[in-house]
Amino acid sequence: MEVYARVRRAVQVDGMSIRQAAREFGLARKTVRKMMQFSLPPGYERKKPVAKPKLGKRPASTALISVSQPCFEVSPDVST
């Protein structure tokens, strides 16, 4: 947001060209033009709502069964 304001001020108030502002701030000229077009940076909005999963949710009991059965045996601790 800070860079956005500095670029707009440099071009509009100080009279800097778009090409010079792009060079000084390390931006593309197209980006500087977009900054000049909008007073605030445009926010991001999804075009479509988030798609729901097609298969649905797994039952919680299935997840617990697979976790509760270990795949390996624990050997007793041998002290030396």
Image (tube, rainbow, N blue to C red):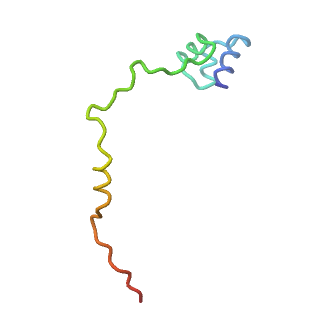
Nearer to us in this view, 38 or 80:
80
Which residue is found at the position 70% from the left and 16% from the top?
Answer: 10
Location of residue 28 (image quadrant): top right
Which residue is found at the position 29% from the left and 35% from the top?
Answer: 56
**64 sits left or right of 7 in the view:** left
On the rendered image, what quadrant is the C terminus found in? Answer: bottom left
Nearer to us in this view, 26 or 54:
54
Nearer to us in this view, 10 or 23:
10
Number of numbered labels in the structure image: 0
Horizontal and vertical percent position of residue 23: 60, 22
Nearer to us in this view, 27 or 67:
67
Which residue is found at the position 28% from the left and 62% from the top?
Answer: 69
Horizontal and vertical percent position of residue 37: 58, 10
| Residue ranking furthest to the bottom | 80
Horizontal and vertical percent position of residue 6: 69, 21
**28 sits left or right of 67 in the view:** right
